[in-house]
Image (cartoon, rainbow, N blue to C red):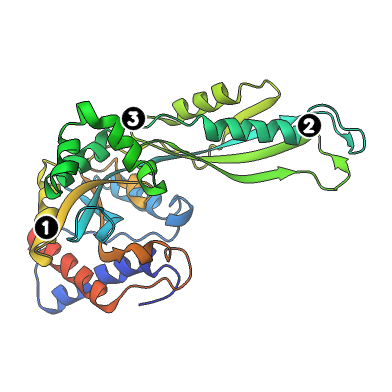
Amino acid sequence: MGGRGALDDKGSLVGILEAVEQLVTAGAKPRRTVYLAFGYDEEVGGRRGAARIAELLASRNVHPELVLDEGGALATGLVAGISAPVALIGIAEKGYVTVGLTAQAEGGHSSMPPDETAVGMLAAALTRLEHQQMPRAIRGPTAAMFDYLGPEMSFGPRLVMANRWLFGGILARKFGATPQGNAMLRTTTAPTVLQAGVKENVLPSSARALVNFRILPGDSVESVVEHVRQVVHDSRISVQPLEETKSNPSGVSRVDGEPFRLLARTIRQVVPGAVVTPWLVVGATDSRHYARLTPNVLRFAGTAIGRDDLRRVHGTDERVGVQAYADAVRIYIQFLKNAVL
């Protein structure tokens, strides 16, 4: 299966439908109700898709025992120190806020610039934000992940993960050395859009930037905006979050509850050698819209994903292998058998 979106997220969409079709064709009679909910706008917030589906279910007083969405995957060769496939079950996801910075200054002709321009002030503010990021923290889903993965590793890493009270700083520095690890330890800071000037010899009177933050559980939209104001620390630059896309981090689903154990058992039945672990989804999924219906929200797509696949998501040659797709279908079938048959 190839093409844009094959990994994220058409592979799991088609896998779910094929699993259900096979069970129905075989005459399966579920003892509980199963809802299949597919939105069309997950990549832009899900407000017209999943959000409206969730509103409809809430109006009908539907409260599912669990919600299973995409997010995690069956990672192969991605977790250092573990050769077995690692099933990353997302038990929470980061929040989201984009903050607009607008610098105001006197415009004019570029031949007579003032000491500070709107562009220069904005550039300095962005540099401060990149150099003074929100602190790293090992907590919540990431702490749970270390608890699960530590026993699967060799003595040295196992010792570090089991004694975070002593080695937490070392672990955070080493794990946070990559963009992927860093994203699991802190609220990330990413300048994404710059807007200033229309002509090469004219000083713009204003310059604007958008900075995107993915919010670690334990932080909030409000704490991020306050952090930005304190770091920018310039009355000539306004700081304003974009209201239409902001969301706080999700709640954290329990790893000692039956829904997590059910999914973990299912994965091990289909992939016997897999190491199952809780995980923090560093992006966003439609599942946050369903959180008001149930506290048990899990994020896992049965597709196997390797190191080379990471650069293909939303990129060139995005694809799902035949065997990986077959395994995903088997996981969905087994999950439904365990949950409702």
Q: Which of 26 and 119 is in front in this view?
A: 119
Any mark on residue 117, and which?
2
In 3D space, how far apart are the residues under numbered discs 3 and 2 (Cα atoms)?
37 Å
The quadrant of the picture occupied by the C terminus is bottom left
In 3D space, how far apart are the residues under numbered discs 1 and 2 (Cα atoms)?
64 Å
- SS label for mark 1: loop
Q: Earlier in the sequence, mark 3 or mark 2?
A: 2
Image coordinates of residue 192 in percent, x first then y, are 58, 46
Residue at x-position 45% and y-position 70%? 4
Mark 1 vs mark 2, foreground winner is: 2
- SS label for mark 2: loop
> Which residue type does callout 3 highlight?
Gly
- SS label for mark 3: loop
Mark 3 vs mark 1, foreground winner is: 3
Residue at x-position 27% and y-position 78%? 322
- The answer to whether the residue labelled 3 contacts the one labelled 2, judged by CB atoms less than 8 Å apart, is no
Mark 3 vs mark 2, foreground winner is: 2
Name the residue that disc number 1 marks: 32
Q: Which of marks 1 and 2 is nearer the N terminus?
A: 1
Vertical placement of 125 versus 297: above or below?
A: above
Any mark on residue 133, and which?
none
Vertical placement of 44 versus 184: above or below?
A: below
> Which residue type does callout 2 highlight?
Thr
